[in-house]
Image (cartoon, rainbow, N blue to C red):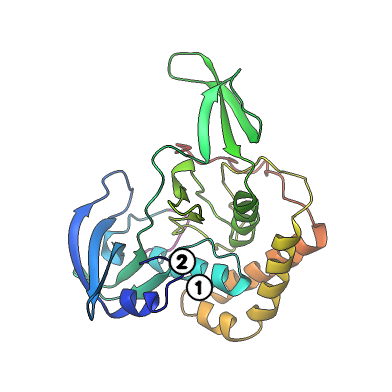
């Protein structure tokens, strides 16, 4: 089953979850599962709330809800950048359940390359040195969907857009995952997607932001209040207005690190 297939949210919300393994590189409990309902089967990621690691700047037990809220924002705006995601009971209690996305093996959209190997169509973000002391550059693809993701991250205030959180699906679609530390009321944008800073937002992103602004005053706003504080929903609306007024990608703040660590 793919993200756009009919019935995918019903499968995720009501299907039987069978844990098959754990993604050991994740900082919070992240379980790889099979899920099935009425003869339809798929794979998913299940993150139980009880497996969330406490953070100093995000309230305990809120990360799963933030993943749901980020999906709702993506869908309402028409970004389509987050795989279908629900909040539901599971084998280890309530948690986030998200459709698994199969990715290409040889086509990363974010990379670290030697300084003299930045290819056309790639945007440099950060120059540093690799573990051997050789000059290296953090780069990302100048891909239309990545342009949208950079705008999306700015509006949801993503504090942790690592390179490994960008998925290039086998069918060519692009998705972002791991949105547990988004939508804080304080500015916290940390991302590897700085390649367009200060450049005009693409028209598709502007249209998505306008659509989001309209939805925030209706059902979307009410649904977001199930997972976020009123201050956080209000801050989301303010970021939408600020981005639309500026019309350009934001620049990093001097008040906190601009890039998450590690970058992948």
Q: Give the label, 1 or 2, closer to the camera.
A: 2
Q: Residues within 10 Å of mark 1 (few under 14, many from 20)?
A: many
- Magenta-colored stretch includes residue 237: no
Quadrant housing residue 154: bottom right
47 in relation to 11, above or below: above
187 in relation to 211, above or below: above
- Front in this rendered view, residue 168 or 33: 168
Chief secondary structure of the magenta span?
A: loop
Quadrant housing residue 242: bottom right
Label 1 with label 2: CB-CB less than 8 Å: yes
- Front in this rendered view, residue 253 or 171: 171
Quadrant of image for the N terminus: bottom left
Residue that carries the numbered disc 2 in the rendered image: 66
Quadrant housing residue 151: bottom right
Task: Give the residue displayed 23% in from the left and 52% down from the top.
Answer: 22
Which label was assigned to residue 228? Answer: 1
In magenta, the rendered stretch is 56-60
Which label was assigned to residue 87? Answer: none
Quadrant of image for the C terminus: top left
Task: Give the residue displayed 38% in from the left and 57% down from the top.
Answer: 101
Q: Say what secondary structure mark 1 lies in.
A: loop
Residue 43 at x, y percent in the picture: 28, 62
- Label 1, label 2: how many angstroms apart (C-alpha)? 7 Å
Task: Give the residue displayed 55% in from the left and 55% down from the top.
Answer: 158
Residue 74 at x, y percent in the picture: 56, 67
Residue 160 at x, y percent in the picture: 50, 49
**Sequence-wise, which precedes: disc 1 or disc 2?**
2
Q: Residue furthest front?
A: 171
57 in relation to 220, above or below: above
């Amino acid at each position: 089953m793919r993200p756009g297939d009919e019935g995918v949210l019903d499968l995720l919300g009501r299907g039987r979850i069978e844990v098959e393994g754990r993604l050991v590189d994740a900082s919070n409990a992240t379980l790889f599962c099979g899920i099935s309902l009425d003869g339809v089967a798929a794979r998913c990621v299940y993150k139980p709330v009880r497996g969330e690691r406490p953070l100093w700047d995000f309230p305990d037990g809120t990360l799963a809800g933030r993943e749901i809220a980020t999906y709702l924002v993506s869908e309402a705006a028409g970004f389509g950048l987050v795989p279908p995601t629900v909040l539901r009971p599971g084998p280890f209690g309530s948690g986030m359940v998200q459709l698994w996305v199969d990715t290409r093996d040889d086509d990363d959209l974010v990379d670290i390359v030697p300084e003299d190997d930045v290819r056309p169509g790639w945007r440099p973000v950060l120059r540093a040195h690799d573990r051997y002391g050789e000059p290296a550059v953090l780069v990302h693809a100048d891909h239309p969907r990545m342009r949208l993701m950079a705008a999306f991250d700015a509006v949801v205030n993503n504090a942790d857009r690592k390179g490994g959180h960008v998925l290039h699906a086998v069918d060519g679609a692009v998705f972002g995952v791991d949105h547990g530390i988004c939508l804080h009321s304080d500015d916290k944008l940390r991302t590897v997607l700085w390649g367009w800073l200060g450049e005009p937002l693409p028209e598709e992103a502007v249209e998505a932001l306008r659509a989001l602004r309209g939805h925030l005053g209706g059902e979307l706003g009410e649904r977001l209040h199930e997972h976020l504080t009123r201050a956080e929903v209000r801050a989301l609306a303010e970021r939408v207005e600020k981005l639309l007024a500026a019309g350009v990608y934001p620049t990093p703040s001097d008040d906190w690190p601009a890039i998450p660590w590690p970058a992948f």
